[in-house]
Amino acid sequence: MAQKKISPGLTLAALAISAFAIGSTEFISVGLIPLLVKSFSISVSQAGITVSIYALGITFGAPLLTILTGTWDRKRLIIAIMITFIIDNIISAIAPSFIILLLGRIIASLAHGIFMSISSVIAADVVVPSKRASAISIMFTGLTVATVTGVPLGTFIGQHTLWHWSFIFISIIGLIGLVANYFLIPDGLPIPGKSNLAGFGRVLKNPSILLALLITAFGYGGTFTAYTFLTPILENSLGFSATAVVIILIVYGLMVAIGNTLGGCLANHNPVKALIYMFLGLAIVLLLLFVTVHFKYLGLISVLLMGFFAFMNVPGLQLYIVQLAEKYTPKDISFASSLNISAFNIGISLGSLIGGQVTNNLSVTLTPIFGALMVFIAIGMTMYLQKREK
């Protein structure tokens, strides 16, 4: 019996739903920290471990799990990932102790890392070559929108009920994603094959791929010097109320979705050239935010423009790493993709760390300048890589 053909658009939508659930759980504990402190009688810094340990799980888990699952059927792997993700969030929801909560966060982070790696490759596989960046952008839209809409919604639920229900909410979204993946991801997708730790060497020894990973960390991470402290900027520097900030974050999420989609379209044919212009736009907007940070409505416009450019580069960065792997290390495409997911999270950690140091030692209003500096470094590396590949 001939297999029923599934529309690529439906496959991408299923992946985006799962990405929304997974993206929501990454930063949900940021909004729940006061509730966790009260519930488990821990310090704020201890509660903050729920964020940092998750990022570490993604960074190290994505490449290692990619090695272990290289021979798995892609659809079955996605289904297994989502089942694991749902169970882990339920564990977090009913955790009787802080240690059990951390355990649930660690395992969920492992599911997060490998999902983003594998789903990027699936998104690129189900469309024609000229639409690959757009396909990746659709999948990543679920993740980026979750960062600024799913997280506030989950926080709202926790604040008005119990924090446990925030993780139940995420589990329900994950269940919807699981069902969608079961019916809408086609069978028979290409399987990378057996891989091993030698893939580390093949990928990281290639100068072009290594440089592309650094570009991801600096170009994507530059936004997080300011984004991590966006609420203090909006409330203390621009003078918006807490209620207004929630609304602004929702609009910010819409700008992220628009920019991400447009970035996919622009990167379809020549991702490197497109990335240079995207990074340049982001750097200019970060400098503009620094200039307007004390002017309420001009500053608001700058913040929304930052959202527009912040994740525009994601599809191009992910597509280009796949293209370079196809060219130089064809046996390790999924592995290279997973390392780029790690690079995204290294960028988040680096940008947040720099922004935190600037905020503590100088002023939160200076964070956009340091973000722009990171992006300018990425521009220089991208131009060099473009010249090298020619």
Image: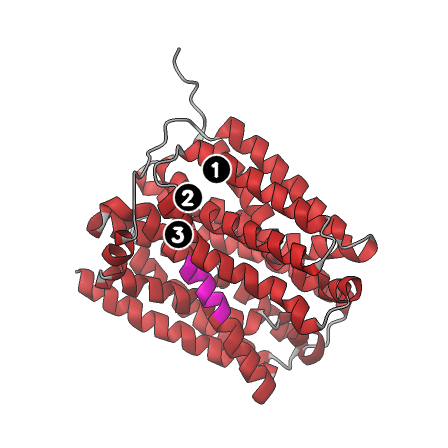
Amino acid type at image mark 2: Ile
Q: Dot 2: what SS?
A: helix
Task: Give the Cα separation between the discs numbered 3 and 1.
Answer: 16 Å
Give the side of residue 226 with respect to residue 43, left or right: left
Q: Nearer the viewer, residue 19 or 32?
A: 32
Name the residue located 74 percent from the left edge and 62 percent from the top edge: 36
Residue 238 coordinates in the image, percent (x, y): 68, 77
The tag earlier along the polypeptide, 3 or 1, is 3
The stretch in magenta equals 342-349
Magenta residue check for 287: no
**Residue 39 in view:** yes
Name the residue located 64 percent from the left edge and 41 percent from the top edge: 173
Residue behind mark 2: 118
Amino acid type at image mark 1: Ile
Residue 49 coordinates in the image, percent (x, y): 61, 66
Q: Nearer the viewer, mark 2 or mark 3?
A: 3
Q: Dot 3: what SS?
A: helix
Q: Are marks 2 and 1 in contact (CB under 8 Å)?
A: yes
Amino acid type at image mark 3: Leu
The tag earlier along the polypeptide, 2 or 1, is 1
Residue 3 coordinates in the image, percent (x, y): 41, 17
Q: Dot 1: what SS?
A: helix
Task: Give the Cα separation between the discs numbered 2 and 1.
Answer: 8 Å
